[in-house]
Image (tube, grey):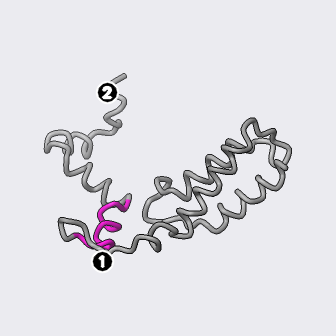
Amino acid sequence: MAASRYRRFLRLCEEWPVEETKQQRDLGSFLRQRVAQAFREGENTPISDPEACDQMYESLVRIHTNFYKNKYPRLKDTTFTGVTVEDCRTILATDILKQMEDMKKGTWKRLREKFSAKKPEEDLK
């Protein structure tokens, strides 16, 4: 029975999209990592709680198939701030978040990083 559960999770991982703009931070990547951890031995992995495993699978399938999005449709695809879904995706992209982190640094720290040969993490050691 563990083999069929393993195959179902693998099929779900294959179907689940990976968002390229969120490198290693999206749900698809996290799901793949968790399945790899949970089924270390592949089809031969013993499952301690089959009911919880089945429940987790069914919950993930509902998320993947947009069950609740279809069951409870939204009138508008914006938030109370008026930001669209596409704007949210752009803001949460890994590249933009790195740029925002750089902007948070003070001028002195940015200049020091730019002109020093060693990395700032080495100063802490």
Q: Is 31 drawn above or below residue 38 in the view shown?
A: below
Q: CA distance from mark 2 to mark 1?
A: 52 Å
Residue sitting at the far left: 107
Q: Residue placed at 32% from the left, 68% from the top? A: 90
Q: Residue placed at 61% from the left, 48% from the top? A: 33
- 87 falls in the magenta region: yes
Residue sitting at the far top: 125
Please, what is the three-letter code of the amino acid marked with disc 2?
Asp
Of 7 and 48, nearer the camera is: 48
Decide if residue 30 is on the left or right side of residue 75: right
Proximity of marks 2 and 1: CB atoms separated by less than 8 Å? no
Q: Residue placed at 31% from the left, 75% from the top? A: 77
Q: Is 92 drawn above or below residue 49 in the view shown?
A: below
Question: What segment is highlighted magenta in the picture?
Answer: 83-93
Please, what is the three-letter code of the amino acid marked with disc 1?
Leu
- Residue carrying label 2: 123
Quadrant location of the C terminus?
top left
- Residue carrying label 1: 75
Say which element carries label 1: loop
Q: Position of residue 74 (x, y in %)?
A: 34, 73
Of 36 and 21, nearer the camera is: 36
